[in-house]
Image (cartoon, rainbow, N blue to C red):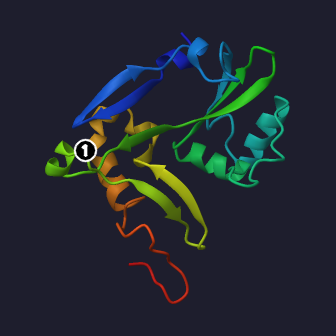
Amino acid sequence: SSAASSRRLFFLCGSHAILMPMVAASNLPAPLTNGELIQTALLDDVPSSDELAQWLLDKGLDTTDWGKENTKDVSKFWKEIKLNEAGLEVWRTVDGTLQPVRTVHVLRAKVTSPDRYQRGIFLFNTWQQYGDGRTRTRNGLLSEKLTTAEMPLEENLHEVCRRAVTEEEMQRVVESTMKIGPGRPAP
C-alpha cells in the first residue's frame, strides 16, 4: 500500500472528530491528479537543512526560489520536519516531472458557545499580525498544525484545541481594526 492510502483527513463536527480516508490519487488537485508517490523523506534521510537541500537537488528539484515572498525557505521547512510538524513527499506527475509536496495535518475548528452555536455564530480569524508588524489576511476558522505525535487526533483532540486557542492564533481576541505598533502595545 502507498503512503497516500494510509493518511487520513479529520473533520470536526460539533464535538466529534470524524476520521475520513484520504482521496485517491485520481482525485488529487493538479498537478498531482493521477500522479504517483515516489518517495517520502524521513528525518534520518535529511538530518540537517543542508542535507535536505542536497536531497532535493539530487532529485533534480530546484529550491532557489524557496523563501521568497510567502514561501518557506529550506531551513524553515527542515525545522518543521525536525519538529514532526510537516513531512516531505516527492510525487511524479502525469507528465513525468517530480513535484515536492509538503504534507501537514491541520485541525480547523469552530470556536463558539452553546447558545451562539444554535444561531450559527462563531469566531472567525480575519487577519494575523507578525511580531515585526507585517500582517496577512487569514479569513478562516481557527486552525492548528498537528505534529505526527498527535496522531491519531482522537487521542489528542482536547490538548490540540487548548493549544490552538491559548498559545497560537486566538491568544488575544480583539476588534478586527486593532493593530500593534509603536505606541500601541499588544493587549
Residue 175 picture quarter: bottom left
Identify the residue at the far left of this view: 115
Name the one closer to the observer, 53 or 48: 53
Tell me if I can see residue 152 in this picture: no
Q: What is the residue that sits farthest to the top in this orientation?
A: 1
Whether residue 19 is situated above or below residue 85 in the rendered picture: above
Q: Is residue 143 in sight in this rendering?
A: yes
Specify whether 28 is left or right of 66: left
Q: Nearer the viewer, residue 163 or 119?
A: 119
Q: Residues within 10 Å of mark 1 (few under 14, many from 20)?
A: few
Residue 10, placed above or below residue 73: above
Residue at far bottom of view: 183
Q: Residue at x 42, y 39 (%)?
A: 149
Is 184 rendered above or below residue 95?
below
The quadrant of the rendering that contains the C terminus is bottom left
In the rendered view, does 62 fall on the left or right side of 134?
right
The correct choice, above or below, for 1 with respect to 92 in the image is above
Give the percent coordinates (x, y) of residue 168.
42, 59
* Spot occupied by residue 16 in the image (x, y as percentages of width and height): 23, 32
Q: Give the number of callouts.
A: 1
**Nearer to us in this view, 69 or 41:** 69
* SS class, disc 1: loop
Give me the residue at 74% from left, 18% from top.
93
Q: Is residue 11 left or right of residue 25?
A: left
Which residue is labeled 1 in the image?
Answer: 120
What is the x, y in percent for residue 8?
Answer: 43, 24
- Which residue is depicted at the point 81% across and 33% down? 61
Quarter of the image where the N terminus is located: top right
Q: Residue at x 61, y 33 (%)?
A: 42
Q: Is residue 102 left or right of residue 167?
A: right
| Kind of residue sitting beneath label 1 | Gly
Residue 32 in the image, given as x and y percentages of width and height? 67, 21
